[in-house]
Image (spheres, rainbow, N blue to C red):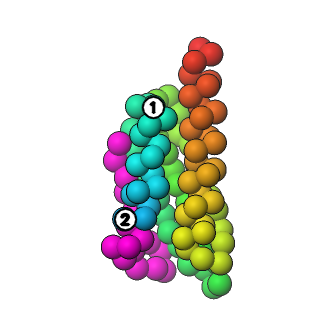
Amino acid sequence: MQITIQGIGVKVTDALNDYVNDKFKKLEKKGDFITSIAVTLAVEKLDQTAKADIAVTGDNLHAEATSDSMYAAIDALIDKVDRQVVKHKEKLKQE
């Protein structure tokens, strides 16, 4: 699984990079159908936004979260992505 992190209007520090990598590495336990993840961290005025595009077997998933803090936005994003990955895994089992 390849994780790409991009910052728009924000510098991706080592701390942010490590935090995102640690959170998204936990998805590897959900299954090996995730091929790559592209994470975009953006700052627009007072909103901190984290977006993720996940390439999975046979589909692409997208999630987005906004908060006052970048770390809170990343936490909310990983929760949304986790739910989508579980739902996709269940969908693969039914086929």
Quarter residue 45 falls in: bottom right
Residue neighbourhood size for the residue with mark 1, other residues' Cα within 10 Å, grouped as few (<14), some (14–19), many (≥20): few
What residue range appears in magenta?
Answer: 1-17
Let me know if residue 10 is in the magenta part.
yes
Q: Amino acid at mark 2?
A: Asp
**Residue under the point 42% across and 71% down:** 16
Checking the image for residue 31, the label placed there is 1
Q: Are marks 2 and 1 in contact (CB under 8 Å)?
A: no
Q: Residue furthest bottom?
A: 45
Label 1 sits on a secondary structure element that is loop
Let me know if residue 50 is in the magenta part.
no
Q: In this view of the protein, which residue sits in the foreground, 35 or 31?
A: 31
Checking the image for residue 18, the label placed there is 2
Residue 66 picture location, percent across and down: 65, 68
Q: Looking at the image, is mark 2 or mark 1 earlier in the sequence?
A: 2
Label 2 sits on a secondary structure element that is helix
Q: In this view of the protein, which residue sits in the foreground, 55 or 73?
A: 73
Residue 38 picture location, percent across and down: 44, 54
**Residue under the point 40% across and 31% down:** 32
**Residue under the point 65% across and 78% down:** 68
Q: Amino acid at mark 1?
A: Gly
Residue 9 picture location, percent across and down: 48, 80
Q: In this view of the protein, which residue sits in the foreground, 24 or 44?
A: 24
